Every structure is written in structure tokens, then in C-alpha cells.
Image (tube, grey):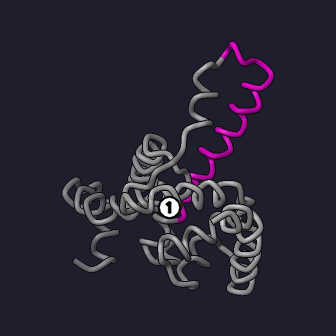
Amino acid sequence: MSEQELIQQLRQGNEPAFRWLVQTYRNRVFHTVLNILQDSKEAEDAAQETFIQVFESIGTFKEESSLSTWIYRIATRKALDKIRRRKTRQKLHKILPWWMPEEKKSAEETFHHPGIAAENKEKAAILFKAIQSLPEKQKLAFTLIKVQGMNYEEACEVMQQNVKAVESLITRAKVNLQKLLEDYYSAQ
């Protein structure tokens, strides 16, 4: 089935077409949001919210980009929204720790990516913690290109940025990661 046929069937509310879309993209969408959020539960929610929005918004899809780029754009937006909400909750927790006691526990947990071999878990956890502390746009660019393996053109479309801007974000992310990881690697 061509992308155009799929879009038409989705616009008509064809359930098998939507099921095919979810089965085709679910792993890539999940891993994209997982690498951004570094929390499996939140990544599952964001992936589910992504497909709900795709289903509800397919009628407004302008086809200015590929369907996959549009889906990734929705997914990254959902993940970034969750990060913003998480930061707001963390600020509230500092002010009112008795109101949301589970926030402290979740903020202290270490992220272990399910795709990393056991012997590399510690290094990966330190790297993902450093990535998490990058500014939002740097984190997104680095995650899409260096972690997810997207090419620059795809990442530019997802982020709605030009190539120079994304290259600059990657360069700054690398410099910041070097600074953040300097102590860890100098102790090795």
C-alpha cells in the first residue's frame, strides 16, 4: 500500500489501515519518545497519545512532509510536553513536598535503556543522565540524530529547523556532553 493510499484510508476511518499504521510505527515511535523521556511508562503514554492524535488529526495532515515525519513531529511534541509537565511537577514538589511524595522517588531513579547490553548499563545510564540535562532543543537534536540514527534531513523536518540550526545544536550538545562527562571519564 502506498503512503497516499494509506492516508486516504486513514482519512476514511479505515480501522485495518490504522492498525497497520500503529504496527508499522509503534516501535520507532516508542523508542524515539523513550530516548527523549528516559522513562518507560511515560514513553508508553506518549506513544499512545501520538497515535490517538494521528487518528484524530489525519484530516488536517497537509502532506507537506512524509507521513512518518509528521508522526515523529507529533511524537516529539508529546514527549517534550511530558518533560515540561515533569519540570512543573518537580518545581511544585520543591514547594509542596507533602503534596506529591512520589515525585521525589521518580526524579531520583536511574534510567536503564532496554536496548543496552548489561555490561554497558552503567555507562549508558551516565550518558542518558547527561543527555537529559541538555537544553531541550540540543537534547532533541542529539537524540534524533545520534541516538535514534535519523539523518539530518529527517531530523530537520521533525524539528522544523534548517540544517545549519540542527548542526549547531548537535555541536553544542557534544560540547556540553563533553563537559558533563569530563569528571566521569577522567576518574576512569
Picture residue at 70% right of the left edge, 75% below the top:
174
What amino acid type should be assigned to the residue bearing mark 1? Thr
104 over 65 or under it: above or below = above
Picture residue at 55% right of the left edge, 59% below the top:
76
Rate crowding at label 1 as few (under 14), some (14 to 19) or many (20 or more) other CA atoms within 10 Å: few
Question: Where, by quadrant of the figure, is residue 1 drawn?
Answer: bottom left
Question: Where, by quadrant of the figure, is residue 161 drawn?
Answer: bottom right
Residue nearest the viewer, comparing 83 with 109? 109
Picture residue at 72% right of the left edge, 35% below the top:
88
Asked if the stretch drawn in magenta spans residue 64, the answer is: no
- Region in magenta: 73-99
Residue 35: percent from left, percent from top:
51, 59
Magenta region's main secondary structure?
A: helix
Badge 1 is on which residue? 60
Secondary structure under the numbered disc 1 in the rendered image: helix
Residue 135: percent from left, percent from top:
75, 60
| Residue 108 appears in the picture as rendered | yes
